[in-house]
Amino acid sequence: MKNVMVLGSTGSIGMQTLDVIRNSEALRAVSLAACQNIERLEEQIREFHPSVVCVYEPERAEQLKRRLTGVKVEILSGMEGLIACATLAEGDILVAAMVGMIGIRPVIEAVKKKKDIAFANKETLVTAGHIIMPLVKEYGVHFLPVDSEAYDALYNRGFMVPISDPALTEAAAQMYPAIRDAVMKNGELVALPVKVTEVRAAHPEKAPLPIFSR
């Protein structure tokens, strides 16, 4: 069973994530977070029974508490609440789908707790990629885009390189077991979160890979 934490559960990506969880026996939602849509969040709480939720706006969090009297769930608010939802001890992977830069601190703290990250928030990477990506490598977590904008942000800011040559792919796989979770497009492996210099060193006979400037 994989325990999933969802920041931005009431948005489009968050709801799609929960739809996947709804139809899988291998996934469970253990924490949910939203900015202010407590009506939809209440429905999600009653269906998925997370142990912790966060409503970023404190007043809306208090309203949700009154609506859920008698329901066993911890309701938090503010940035500390988001961080708590993103770093839950039993959580395995964080879906970071909150809009804007609000997701930066929760993602950083989740990486430090060695949580895998599925992100759909390009602002987090564009603004703080230079901080987050070294932490991803340091803590050995998977950091994968789950929508096209997030993929473009990761790819075009130089944090990923294209992997098309089979021999080069094999070399990368030996260094990065996370190749199993590599970004796929139309059924083909198109990129990995690797350092270009390390791949070139492992395969010096290959032509230099294109790299996109940050």
Image (spheres, rainbow, N blue to C red):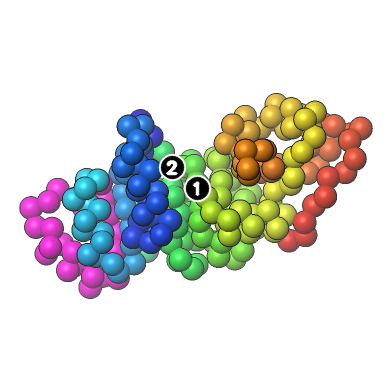
Q: Which residues are magenta?
A: 50-74
Residue 19: in sight, yes or no? yes
Q: Which residue does the image show at 15% across and 62% down from the upper left? A: 65
Q: Is residue 23 left or right of residue 149?
A: left
Q: Which residue is mark 1?
A: 118
Q: Position of residue 123 (x, y in %)?
A: 55, 65
Number of residues whose C-alpha sits closer than 10 Å to that of mark 1, classed few (under 14), some (14–19) or many (20 or more): many
Q: Which residue is mark 2?
A: 93
Amino acid type, callout 1: Ala
Asked if the residue under mark 1 is in contact with the one under mark 2, i.e. CB atoms within 8 Å, the reply is: yes
The quarter of the picture where residue 34 lies is bottom left
Q: Which residue does the image show at 58% across and 56% down from the upper left? A: 148
The quarter of the picture where residue 15 lies is bottom left
**Which residue occupies the foreground of this view, 177 or 38?**
38
Q: Position of residue 101 (x, y in %)?
A: 50, 67
| Farthest residue, direction left | 70
Q: Quadrant of the N terminus?
A: top left
Q: Position of residue 71 (x, y in %)?
A: 12, 51
* Label 1 element class: strand
Amino acid type, callout 2: Ile
The quarter of the picture where residue 14 lies is bottom left
In reply to whether residue 44 is colored magenta, the answer given is: no
In reply to whether residue 60 is colored magenta, the answer given is: yes
Task: Say which label, 2 or 1, has the lower sequence index.
Answer: 2
